[in-house]
Amino acid sequence: MKILITGICGFVGSTLAHALREMQPDNFIRPGSETNRVPLTKLGVKVFRGDIRFARDLEKLPAVDWVIDAAANPSVLAGVDGKTSSYELVEHNLYGTINMLEFCKAHRAGFILLSTSRVYSIPPLAALKVQSVKKAFCPVFKKSPPGLSKAGVSESFSTAPPVSLYGATKLASEALALEYGETFSFPVWINRCGVLAGAGQFGRADQGIFAYWLNAWLRKHPLKYIGFDGKGSQVRDCLHPRDLLPLLEKQMASNGKGKTRVQNVSGGAQSAMSLAQLSDWCTARFGKQAIASQVAPRPFDIPWMVLDSALAKRQWNWHPQTPMLQILEEIAVHAEKNPKWLELSAPS
């Protein structure tokens, strides 16, 4: 079976490719991503350099059986942060997906989109009533909106706008992927991922937060709690991308009958942690570090985001395999071995 992975030289794509060892197009837009090309080539992965925004770049690609779309600008602040224009965001995250869907249509290939938790509506999440428990926000579930429970945000939670420009491009990509698959009779799966984390991730303050926090802490770079109580109580769960592989293999082998096409895929409540709790872990691992505080939130910030992956577990018998503490230790070891990682992945 031939598999094409877009964004293969990014963190998620390269992690998947190390196991799947197949081919892909990539424009290496993310700083540092070019460094992944040589290791992938040594593994026998055929790397095509191109830009999925341009249909002509896909013409040189051979036919494949499946496309795993892992290429995107992954920042919720994209399009509004002054670093990327709103048009560029739509080009990368939506037009690129459309080109890949046309590729799948032409080659009768299946399509798997790695989507995001940020397709869920921001206002009800931002307005969640929360209480701080052991330095971490916890929703008051008696007054929680439909689709939210102690297990997290389920697929039934509202996707009504606003979801951010980034979230809107991913939600539109989901809808188009499902329509293309139905109209042109090729299989489509949508996996809404929470925070993906692990060694080799390119960390910045607005994305790859676990990798960024650990690398910055180790090097004594300035760190800041932003928003809400200014104490770092906001919570996210995390998943190692290699834990996606068993799910992807089952999806590619399935005929799809009786399966829901869209599912959450995340570490869940057992792999959730606040920034303050992450700081405690870093203190124990690396030593103390002063952290500044800014009470005013950034655009699109929410206090608590944990995805409920019960549907994926029911449909595929899928569950995360890498505990959160193991993920953090893996990132820490990589950070110690790569002292210039932040400069490489996010140069000023």
Image (cartoon, rainbow, N blue to C red):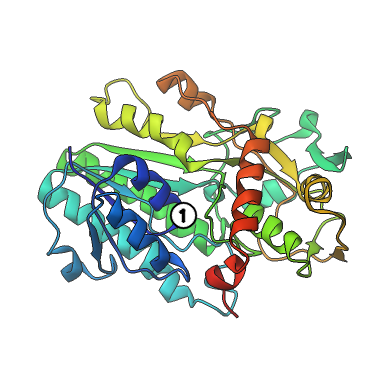
At x 66%, y 44%, the residue is 328
**Quarter placement of the N terminus:** top left
**Quarter placement of the C terminus:** bottom right
Point out residue 66 in the picture as x, y percentages from the top left corner.
22, 42
The residue closer to the viewer here, 56 or 91, is 56
Say whether residue 319 is left or right of residue 126. Answer: left
From this viewpoint, is residue 40 visible? yes
Say whether residue 49 is left or right of residue 80. Answer: left
At x 74%, y 60%, the residue is 218
263 vs 232: above or below: above
The residue closer to the viewer here, 262 or 205, is 205
17 vs 38: above or below: above
The residue closer to the viewer here, 83 or 43, is 43
Q: Quadrant of residue 325?
A: top right
**What is the total number of numbered labels drawn onto the structure image?**
1
19 vs 167: above or below: above
From this viewpoint, is residue 8 visible? no
Point out residue 214 in the picture as x, y percentages from the top left corner.
70, 55
Say whether residue 99 is left or right of residue 8. Answer: left
Instruction: Identify the residue at the far front of this view.
Output: 337
Q: Helix or strand or loop: what does disc 1 sit on?
A: helix
Q: Which residue is mark 1?
A: 11
| Residue type pointed to by label 1 | Phe
Mark 1 burial class by Cα count in 10 Å: few <14, some 14-19, many 20+: many
Q: Quadrant of residue 255?
A: top left
At x 11%, y 54%, the residue is 62
